[in-house]
Image (cartoon, rainbow, N blue to C red):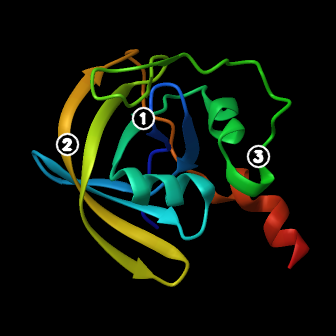
Amino acid sequence: MFINGISIILTGTNDDYKGMAIAWVSQVEKEHLIVSVPKGAQATNLLLERKMFSVNELGLGQENLALQFGGKNCHRDLISIIPQIKGTEHNLPILLNCCSSSICSVQSLGEINEQVVITAKIISTTKGIDMPSLVFNKATYFGDMEKEH
């Protein structure tokens, strides 16, 4: 099993944005990364239109933030950690209360099953809170969905 950290993707503009929690981000070299996002999600569609996004790496203890941005089954009532979102000079929001935030531009796209795989160039990275990364545990985020099938 591969270990993945959890990040929040934000896209749109400083004033009008969408976000989603993802667990599939990999930096492939100094200036590029690959992310996998769900095909057809509102945030994915906006990301594909805007061709820019921020990757905001969550830290240990920020599970509620991940669940707030968790897609169809997200928990909107969890407010123990309120997202602190700030606009940037790129007219793209970043999350302040996370380990790091990177502004990225889309370089290429591919599709695998129900995922859109994006290769992106990292434009800038901002260091955030010093804490260990929040690690993806499939049972924590998808346990209820597996029981339904």
Query: Which is nearer the eye, 137 or 103?
Result: 103
Say which residue label 3 marks. 74
Residue type at mark 3: give it.
Cys
Q: Is mark 2 on a helix, strand or loop?
A: strand
Instruction: For residue 109, say whether it is visible.
Output: yes
- Residue placed at 64% from the left, 59% from the top? 138
Say which residue label 1 marks. 57
Q: Is residue 146 above or below residue 52?
A: below
Say which residue label 2 marks. 122
Tell me which label, 2 or 3, sits earlier in the chain: 3
| Residue 94, image quadrant | top left
- Residue placed at 46% from the left, 40% from the top? 12
| Residue 70 horizontal/vertical position (percent) | 67, 47
Q: What element carries label 3?
A: loop
Q: Is mark 1 on a helix, strand or loop?
A: strand
Which of the numbered marks, if any, corresponds to residue 104?
none
CA distance for labels 2 and 3: 28 Å
CA distance for labels 2 and 1: 14 Å
